[in-house]
Amino acid sequence: MRSSIVLCLGLSSLSLLACADDGAGDASGSTSSTSGDGDGDPSSSGESGESGETSAGDGDGDPATGDGDGDGDGDGDGDGDGDGDGEQPCQVEPDACGGDLVCDVITGECTSPDLPCVLAGPSTPCGDQLCGPGTVCDDQGACIPVAPCSGQTCEGPHCWGVGCACERPILCTTATAEQLNGPFATDIFDLEFADDCDAWMVTLRSGTDYVRRMTPIGELTEWAGVANLNMGEVAVLKALIPQDQPPPPPYEGQIAGPEAPSLDDEDMLGEVAITYTCCPTCGCFVDPPQGVARLLEGEMVPLPIVLPAVPTQGQDGPFNATASDAGPMGLTWGDDLQLYVGNSQQNGNFDTADLGAETQDLLTTFASRITAAAPLTPVHLLLALDTGELLRFNTVTLESTPVFDFEVGVTSLSHDSFSGLVYAARSDLAVLAIDPFSAEITDFEQMPALGRVSVSPQGQLWWVPAKHVVGDMPLSTWELPMTW
């Protein structure tokens, strides 16, 4: 986990977070991190600004020397904005903070990076804009907000995050580990939580497979799948930045930045989709033999296939098991209400299914099989390939940016909407925290056995055993930071 201070320098977000010590780490209590520059290798680079120099002036706006403050605005306060209050926010000139101070874009003040809840760092060029802390480039010339900020604002070319939460909002509580480790977890293979703390799972077992839901009060509901198909993943449509406070209004003279894309229909939050899987030698006797299904509660066929697929198989998959490393993988919802999934027609292809239009489109094809995916922003996804490569994929431009190469398989990726980090589970049992825009990789924990991980709304990271591979082991949790 992050300890004391994390300096996040990289491609797009380039943010510096001064984090309170959360005390988390590995089993020995130690932490370590590896920083990348976002191009797929473990090196990093960045530039620090230099404080500007001022010459003496008389405060009347001309260059003559005298007894003024030398900023040339004529008010004598030294801040250069001409209003005499000495309180110009530093967001539009973060390099003006001298010494060891940084510009906190939340307060607009120069402050120590050692204090809690300080969001600072250099800006990233993005067309004619500069994306400061709390924002990232949409790869099309505009800055968009990213966790922990729920909005953004701009003055001139400078943009930065607003409505940034320093404490994790806890709006609900999931069922307990004891409840989830009952019948709900029988033959479990994947787990995801909705924003309302409902827990969703899919099985991987011999015979009929099931989707199960457990509510926060422990109510269990089950839906049977079609034919004798295995299930691989479950995906729930969630908000990417669920902070519960609105962004503050802009200060006088400040203009609001362009709004980021958002959900067209918030009633769709909580929509559930799953993958049906079947290896080429496993005997898939339905037509289509597998694919992606959408849960339709109350229907005669509650889990109809909406994205047909053909049998595909990993040659060196992260689970090292034929049934587990087969079929479509990397299922995730985008903020555009579309489903994204890999390997539906061949290993490495990446498709989208528009549920409203009932259409399916091939977006791109990667050199190797996709094993996991997670949403990041309204236009970005994080993808893992079976080679261990992590790619940031833009759903609008259809371009990919290398983030890091683990050189070991990834079983799952789970996005934390409070911190913006993504937690990755690897086939060597390591769990790591990833900043997908700065390529900073931090050791987090070690899994008891092969499985997946899933972030819950109340700030826990759940370990999910791949019971088809490791046997009947219980689910367990680690606590995530409540502040930064």
Image (cartoon, rainbow, N blue to C red):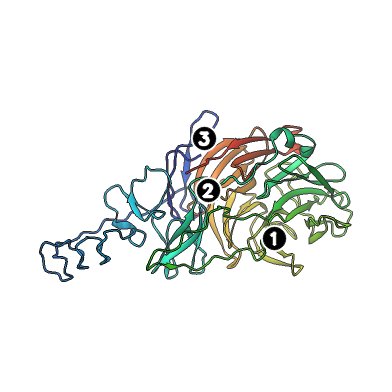
On screen, residue 469 above or below 163: above
Q: Are marks 1 and 2 in contact (CB under 8 Å)?
A: no
- Which residue is found at the position 63% from the left and 36% from the top? 477
Q: Position of residue 117 (x, y in %)?
A: 43, 46
Task: State which mark lies toward you, 3 or 1.
Answer: 1
The amino acid type, in three-letter code, at marker 3 is: Ala
Q: Quick check: can you spot residue 240?
A: yes
Residue 311 figure quarter: bottom right
Helix, strand or loop at label 3? It is: loop
Residue sticking out furthest to the top = 28
Q: Which residue is mark 1?
A: 267
Callout 3 crowding tier (Cα within 10 Å): few <14, some 14–19, many ≥20: some
Q: Is residue 406 or residue 67 the one in the foreground?
A: 67
Q: Are marks 3 and 1 in contact (CB under 8 Å)?
A: no
Left or right: residue 134 versus residue 226 is left
Q: Position of residue 184 (x, y in %)?
A: 78, 39
- Which residue is found at the position 52% from the left and 41% from the top? 482
CA gap, disc 1 and disc 2: 24 Å
Helix, strand or loop at label 2? It is: loop
Helix, strand or loop at label 1? It is: helix
Q: Which residue is mark 3?
A: 24
Residue 55 figure quarter: bottom left
Residue 391 figure quarter: bottom right
- N-terminal-most mark, 1 or 2: 1
Q: Which residue is mark 2?
A: 419
Callout 1 crowding tier (Cα within 10 Å): few <14, some 14–19, many ≥20: few
